[in-house]
Amino acid sequence: MHNIKRDNIQTFFCILVLDGVFVGFEISDRACCHVLGLHGGMVPCLQHTKICQDRSKYVFWDWFHVTETTNLIIAKRILDGEVNDISPINVRALSQI
């Protein structure tokens, strides 16, 4: 059985948070669902909360959850990523064995 290197995805996630622009996001330091606190991520999204116009520009939806766009980017790297993303092989290659 193959051991997927979790740290590669964790490293990539840290890049998303620290420099989301590198991957195509405009905002990586604030939640799309801005509730409380400097970055809007102190509590989960609540009913009647101010929500951003375009969630695809944000890494985070609320204090804990990432946006759909972030999930898609991470999933794509797990599915088809190179060895620096996921090793020893990606999920697509593993499914073809």
Image: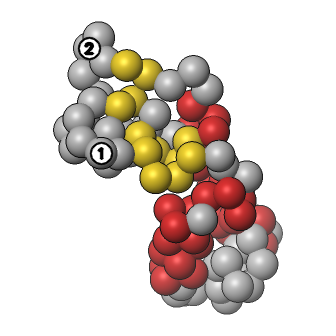
Q: Where 92 sits versus 71, above or below?
A: below
In the displayed structure, does residue 40 sit left or right of residue 72? left
Q: Which of 22 and 74 is in front in this view?
A: 22
* Residue 21 picture quarter: bottom right
Residue 37 image offset from top left, x and y in percent: 24, 42
Q: What element carries label 2?
A: loop
Residue 16 image offset from top left, x and y in percent: 57, 62
Q: What residue is shown at x 24% (from left), y 22% (from top)?
A: 46
Q: Where 89 sits versus 14, above or below?
A: below
Q: What residue is shown at x 65% (from left), y 85% (from top)?
A: 87
User: Is there CB contact under 8 Å for labels 1 and 2?
Assistant: no
Q: What residue is shown at x 57% (from left), y 21% (from top)?
A: 53
Q: What element carries label 1?
A: loop
Q: Is residue 95 visible?
A: no
Kind of residue at badge 2: Gln
Residue 62 image offset from top left, x and y in percent: 36, 39
Quadrant containing the N terminus is bottom right
Q: Mark 1 points at which residue?
A: 38
Q: Which of marks 1 and 2 is nearer the N terminus?
A: 1
Residue 26 image offset from top left, x and y in percent: 65, 46
How many C-alpha atoms fall within 10 Å of the one at disc 2: few (<14), some, or many (≥20)?
few
In the displayed structure, does residue 31 sit left or right of residue 97? left
Kind of residue at badge 1: Leu
Could you say which disc has been placed on residue 47 in the image? Answer: 2
In three-dimensional space, the C-alpha distance between marks 1 and 2, rounded to whole angstroms, equals 20 Å
Quadrant containing the C terminus is bottom right
